[in-house]
Image: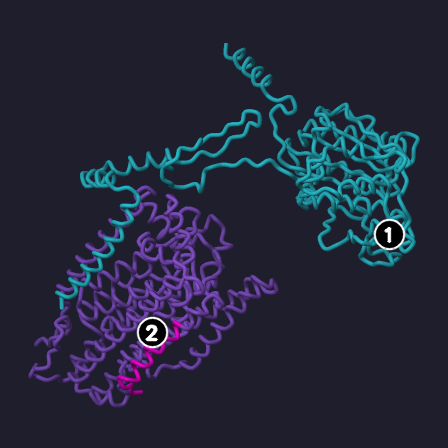
Chain colours: A cyan, B purple
Amino acid sequence: MARPCILFLLLLFLTFSSPSCASTVHNNNWAVLVCTSRFWFNYRHMANTLSLYRTVKRLGIPDERIILMLADDMACNARNSYPAQVFNNENHMLNLYGDNVEVDYRGYEVTVENFLRVLTGRHETAVPRSKRLLSDEGSHILLYMTGHGGDEFLKFQDNEELQSHDLADVVKQMKEKNRFKELLIMVDTCQAVTLFSQLQSPGVLAIGSSKKGENSYSHHLDSDIGVSVVDRFTYYTLAFFEKLDMYSNASLSSLFNSYDPHLLMSTASYREDLYERPLSQVPVTNFFGSVMKTVHTDSAYTGFSMEPEIHVSLVNENIEDGRRVLQTKTTQTQETKHNATESCPFHAWLKVLQDKLDNENADKLVVYGLGSMIILLVISSWFSV
Amino acid sequence: MALTRRSYWALAVGSLIFRLILICFSDDLNLGSRPEVATPVTSLRRLAEGYWLKNSSMSPYSGSMYHGSPLLLPVLGPLTIKRVEGLPSHLFCSSIFIIIDFITAMLIRATGQKLISTNHQSLQRLNLSCVQETTGCTNVGDLASLIFLWNPFTLITCVGSSTSPIDNLMVVLAIYGACSGLPSLAAFGWVVATHLSLYPAILVIPVILLLGYGPDVPPSKLFLLGKSDESGSDYPSDKTSSKQRSKDGSPIYLFSWRPALCFILWSLIWSSYIFFLSFISLKEFGGLSEMMKKTHGFILNVEDLSPNIGVFWYFFAEVFEFFRSFFLIVFHINILFMLVPLVIRLRHRPCFLAFVYIAIMSMLKSYPSVGDSALYLGLLGLFANELAEMRFSFFLLCGYFGISLLSPVMHNLWIWRGTGNANFYFATGIAYASLQTVLIVESVSTILKHDRMLRNKLTA
């Protein structure tokens, strides 16, 4: 008898909930930025990743929620004529390797195994929290990968490869474990679109810099440093974001439509069949920044407080979000007041006195009481002499 | 050093004017934010916050900012708000504290005069007036009040946005009332001092002894040994001390119970008065239990571990939760277990006993500040005659100077520059505690040596 009722209620609840999210609400953003190349001539891949790291931090995602995987052998490379500096433009206006770059996996730690462990969360017990992707069912994750790739694979550090079915498997595991609410995969390699061709999990949006059979090209060569410093796809992505700040609400569709195949010299195409929301309604800060919805509450410090004179709505229940707002504790104080004053006639008399006094009178009475205490003191000490 | 009346009053008024000058620069000195001056219990900024909370119909203790008495809020609260254009903030509060410091100094002076007269009479009774000529007969009242007024610690406390001057006034009021045989005054001072900061409760012992036996005299054995006048014409004029030589050699002192019982009665009256006023003040906010939990409970539980010149915070920042209550009990019993032996040894000198208790309390309380040190350093001057032979006095003076200079430096290095760590600051705290220990131990041993010297003079 009870079970059909519960099923009916659940059904009712599900039908009334908004179509985008059944029961979770988006409340944090993560970014996993992976550069899969090493060696000096792959300078541009590291510059790509660091540029995106800087953008994502500028738009609000803190270091605690960014996993940065880099080979990190460019800045202090013996061939770098600008030691400890990494540029993504030949005008050298922006040093990407500044004071606050936190690389979580560097050098030989950037392996396929570690990458898969980060995404699935299956680490050894001794791995520190800063190296884990601690996302939950309310997270939006941005996964950016750059390096050398090909048809259905991505080369890791010149001796391993990540295949598209590996990536699809990992995303499926993440979805099973509720490690993300929505995932945006951005890949900047040759034949990038093939890397996510095997994805099947819902809630995933993916964009690659070139189609099957196409190469992705670097943007320009820096004659001072001697290598290319940025790739075209990432360059135009950054150009789009440099115009934005945290308060912009440019949508993902405007980002995706900003890629011009003539300028990129490849066709950037995306996959939105697994993603429910229309792209024109998704702001880019949902993935690239960290803009949260704030709910204003009227309750003050928890603790004792009097009844406010103006009645405010205490409980604000938003069924869509499933979120509740703190109630003030005025009911609790009423109970304690009643409990404290029932013990003896003195207390009953005191209660009568209390009812006559309200707040301002109490203050005045205290001041008069203090004054009379001083007078009583003076009189008593005078008469004892 | 004999002070003429004119020079004394000139120096006293000069110190008040100096405080007024310091108040003009109080914003630059920024004393209210230094941990040595303002503790979570005494800080005036927290009182302003508590007053604002009270006016916004919230409990003044919410948010764990204010931990003082609710009765201070209507008195000092409006003063913290009043501002005059161009003059520094907290001007009115600091002016009140100047007046309070002056009253405290006058009370110390009066206590000193009582001590001198009692000392004089007892030495005359023992026919040891020659002692006064050898050890010197400084007017301890004047000396102690001037030390109190000109002590840098007192100056800093007066100017520094802290409510310690009120605590100090109440303690000195209790001691003065007890020395003068005014039970109601002594009870008022004791009750209010305990209400404001919990630790003066231990002063009930010396206050009752002062009321029962009278101010400091040499030990009773000396009266047994010495040959006093048979005329009995110089019974002391103040009625509280009733030292009579009984014929069969039983103990000299007769503890006069009347003042002590009056004291207990008056303290009950004052404490119920204070509880009543606090109850009215806090009736919508949880009443007396909330007040006890947030004021005395806060002091005993050491909930705020921000650094100060005491010894609690460093330890309780790292103690495991399981042992926390045990160590709280240990630290507080550390004060309590010293009380009884001191009473047994120093019961003939209750005023000095009060000084030692205040020194122990200022050192071992959970949130000490320089205001507490100012109190006992002022009272130290009352015993200048007996402590003339104290060893290590120069070392202690230099130590106090050194600590008061090093401690803010170490705090700055640790917190603001980040080049030091907590150990730097706590090292100065430990050095300060050691200095105070040396001071207490040396002063007690010097007093005992003084008594021994008196006995030798008698038997010689």
The alpha-carbon separation of the residues under discs 2 and 1 comes to 73 Å
Circle 2 SS class: helix
Answer with the quarter of the image where residue B445 lies.
Answer: bottom left
**Of residues B305 and A41, the one drawn nearer to the viewer in this rendering:** A41
User: Residue most toward the top?
Assistant: A1
For label 1, count other residues whose C-alpha is less than 10 Å away and answer few (under 14), some (14-19) or many (20+): some
Say which of A384 and A209 sits in front: A209
> Quick check: is A224 in the magenta stretch?
no
Chain identity of mark 2: B
Q: Residue at x 31, y 61 (%)?
A: B200
Q: Position of residue A221 (x, y in %)?
A: 91, 49
| Tag 2–tag 1 contact (CB < 8 Å) | no
Q: Chain of mark 1?
A: A
Horizontal and vertical percent for residue A251?
72, 33
The C terminus of chain A - image quarter: bottom left
Q: Magenta region: which residues? A: B1-20
- The mark lying in front, picked from 2 and 1, is 1
Q: Are marks 2 and 1 on the same chain?
A: no
Q: What residue would you read off at disc 1?
A: A90
